[in-house]
């Protein structure tokens, strides 16, 4: 893929104006950057209000992400932008039918950022549109992430941490943002997203969180088959009060692409986690082994593994094996699952395919952020860059 190169910087004045009007916590210089890790938006109200605030606050980042995905999905010109936008538009009816508030929020993002609605849908449906064009082109570019749910104890009480390293193209390193949203008719939530997306990695007021791993399967991207985009399904999970409700929503939603959702919750019933391997036809459930539940970028369930097209390389197998081994070893040393998770996510063992990744050996992928959701203590820890060379920044959870 030919690299794009244009500025995405936001002036201090733009951010101060956004902060004053919309309640945005942005960054300007090292001190504030260290404090927040990524720019943050706090917004409340109806779906359209949330979207408008999002679009206005992060218009430059949204514009950058849009241009990136137009180029990435076009395979450097093999697919016209008009065709990609037509594909994005084809997702609108199914989203409107199942989650009308999401369409209203995306329309608000488009209005705030000065974009077309189908352009915002394209950002949210990038995984699903990729499945369609990959089926035709037989090219496979695999984002690589390592996700974990770890159980333990803090002061002799049950504890749970959920998190991952988010690995993707280093061109997107300056475009992630944190959304702190209070929807009028859904749980409050916090999520790290690519600007313009409704959700990605995060948790809600019910201490229910979700992580994402890229997967692909032979059933993906069937012609004329459109479902709820993967990143919209992530937002649907963050609108749930329980793991059971999240599973029900995912199983009942039409899908056209694969993904792995690692879910965890620590509510009054105690800590629990569940992994969902998703393809257009099936949702396979995986439960924890002892005090851990780990996933990378290949299907683990026997019923779906035969059709897996994302587990061909050594990276996913190496990271999975290393995370499993480290999780076992650290259980004997540290009871706090959040501390254990940070030690795993910084690991450089297993080169050239470590858990915390630089641009070598693959210059198109590196770890953009480490994320630890301490669901027991209601806090969020982030790194802006690979955890092995970036500080962990602690942020509040969901009030």
Image (cartoon, rainbow, N blue to C red):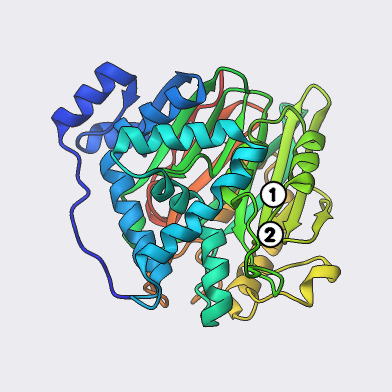
Report whether 280 appears left or right of 50.
right
Give the quadrant of residue 25: top left
Q: Which residue is depicted at the point 25% across and 66% down?
A: 4
Q: Which residue is depicted at the point 41% across and 23% down?
A: 42
Crowd around label 1: few <14 · some 14–19 · many ≥20 (10 Å): many
- In the image, residue 243 above or below residue 230: above
Report whether 277 appears left or right of 85.
right
- In the image, residue 235 above or below residue 230: above
Give the quadrant of residue 150: top right
Q: Which residue is depicted at the point 61% across and 58% down?
A: 213
Instruction: Say what secondary structure mark 2 lies in.
Output: strand
For the residues bearing labels 1 and 2, Cβ distance under 8 angstroms: yes
In percent of width and height, residue 386 lies at: 42, 56
Looking at the image, which is closer to me, 306 or 156? 306
Mark 2 = which residue? 295
Crowd around label 2: few <14 · some 14–19 · many ≥20 (10 Å): many
In percent of width and height, residue 394 lies at: 46, 32
Is residue 313 visible in the rendered image? The answer is yes
Gap between marks 1 and 2, in whole Å?
Answer: 8 Å
Label 1 vs 2, first from the N-terminus: 1
Q: Quadrant of the C terminus?
A: top right
């Amino acid at each position: 893929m030919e690299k794009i190169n244009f500025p995405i910087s936001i002036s201090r004045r733009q951010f101060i104006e956004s902060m004053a009007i919309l309640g945005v916590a942005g960054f300007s210089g090292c001190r504030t950057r260290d404090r927040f890790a990524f720019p943050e938006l706090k917004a409340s109200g109806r779906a359209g209000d949330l979207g408008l605030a999002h679009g206005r606050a992060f218009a430059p980042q949204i514009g950058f992400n849009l241009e990136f995905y137009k180029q990435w999905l076009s395979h450097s010109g093999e697919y016209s932008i008009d065709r990609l936008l037509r594909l994005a538009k084809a997702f609108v009816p199914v989203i409107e039918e199942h989650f009308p508030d999401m369409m209203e929020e995306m329309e608000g993002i488009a209005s705030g950022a000065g974009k077309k609605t189908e352009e915002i849908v394209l950002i949210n449906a990038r995984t699903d549109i990729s499945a369609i064009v990959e089926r035709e082109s037989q090219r496979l570019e695999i984002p690589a992430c390592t996700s974990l749910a770890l159980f333990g104890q803090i002061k002799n009480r049950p504890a749970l941490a959920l998190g991952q390293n988010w690995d993707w193209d280093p061109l997107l390193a300056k475009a992630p943002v944190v959304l702190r949203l209070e929807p009028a008719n859904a749980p409050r939530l916090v999520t790290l997203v690519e600007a313009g997306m409704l959700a990605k990695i995060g948790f809600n007021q019910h201490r229910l969180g979700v992580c994402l791993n890229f997967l692909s399967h032979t059933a993906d991207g069937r012609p004329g088959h459109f479902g709820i985009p993967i990143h919209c399904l992530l937002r649907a999970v963050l609108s749930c009060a329980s793991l059971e409700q999240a599973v029900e929503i995912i199983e009942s939603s039409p899908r056209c692409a694969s993904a792995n959702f690692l879910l965890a919750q620590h509510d009054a019933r105690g800590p629990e986690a569940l992994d969902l391997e998703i393809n257009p036809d099936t949702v396979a459930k995986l439960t924890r082994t002892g005090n851990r539940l780990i996933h990378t970028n290949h299907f683990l369930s026997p019923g779906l593994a035969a059709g897996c097209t994302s587990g061909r390389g050594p990276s996913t197998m190496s990271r999975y094996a290393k995370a499993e081994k480290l999780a076992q070893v650290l259980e004997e040393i540290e009871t706090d699952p959040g501390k254990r998770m940070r030690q795993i996510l910084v690991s450089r063992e297993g080169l050239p395919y470590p858990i915390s990744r630089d641009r070598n050996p693959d210059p198109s992928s590196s770890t953009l952020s480490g994320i630890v959701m301490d669901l027991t203590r209601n806090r969020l820890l982030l790194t802006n860059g690979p955890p092995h060379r970036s500080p962990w920044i602690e942020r509040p959870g969901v009030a």
